[in-house]
Amino acid sequence: MVIIVTLIAAFLIVFVIRKHTGVMHLAMLAGLGIYTMFHEIITNFISQTAGDIDSEFVNMIIYAILVVGFPLLLFLKSSRGGLSGILRLVEAAMTAIVVAVLLAEPLSFFFSFDSIATEMHNLIVQIEPPVLLASIIVAYLDILLSRRL
């Protein structure tokens, strides 16, 4: 259920705040790459520094910050505009889907009591690669079709 709420919230945020999403998509993918390369180093450092914090908890927080937190800040700082018409709906839906797909693992971790989130996470793992490829295409289209960069 929490993943569905995240999907709806992400759609509304992107649709209502009329800004370019291309940079956000690319930043999410960059955050995913940074997480993949450096999460063990960062997690070990924070776990050793902070003391009694569960390393899996720290790992999920780092993932959420790198993959959605920083890209959301970039989205909020980006210029106004973006696509219009039906493309705007597609762009908002695609962004919401990507956010939900990327946040499925931490959400199912933090809300382990939500059985729907766990089941959705298992489904989302299978569709993640094509969704990320579509995200790259939408990002480049947004950047290429924007009037100002």
Image (cartoon, rainbow, N blue to C red):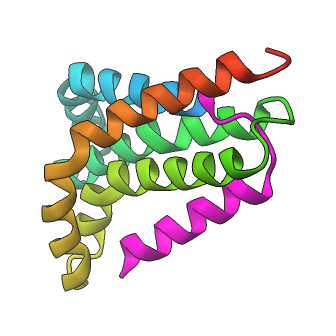
Where 127 sits versus 31, above or below?
below
The x, y position of residue 139, in whole percent, is 55, 28
The quadrant of the rendering that contains the C terminus is top right
Residue 11 located within the stretch drawn in magenta: yes
At x 50%, y 48%, the residue is: 94
Where 119 sits versus 93, above or below?
below
| Quarter of the image where one finds residue 49 | top left
Which of the pair 71/122 is nearer the observer?
A: 122
| Quarter of the image where one finds residue 10 | bottom right
User: Main structural element of the magenta stretch: helix, strand or loop?
Assistant: helix
At x 72%, y 56%, the residue is: 15
At x 55%, y 20%, the residue is: 140
Would residue 26 be found to the left or right of residue 12 on screen?
left
Residue range (magenta): 1-23
The x, y position of residue 107, in whole percent, is 32, 65
The x, y position of residue 117, in whole percent, is 26, 75
Which of the pair 142/39 is nearer the observer?
A: 142
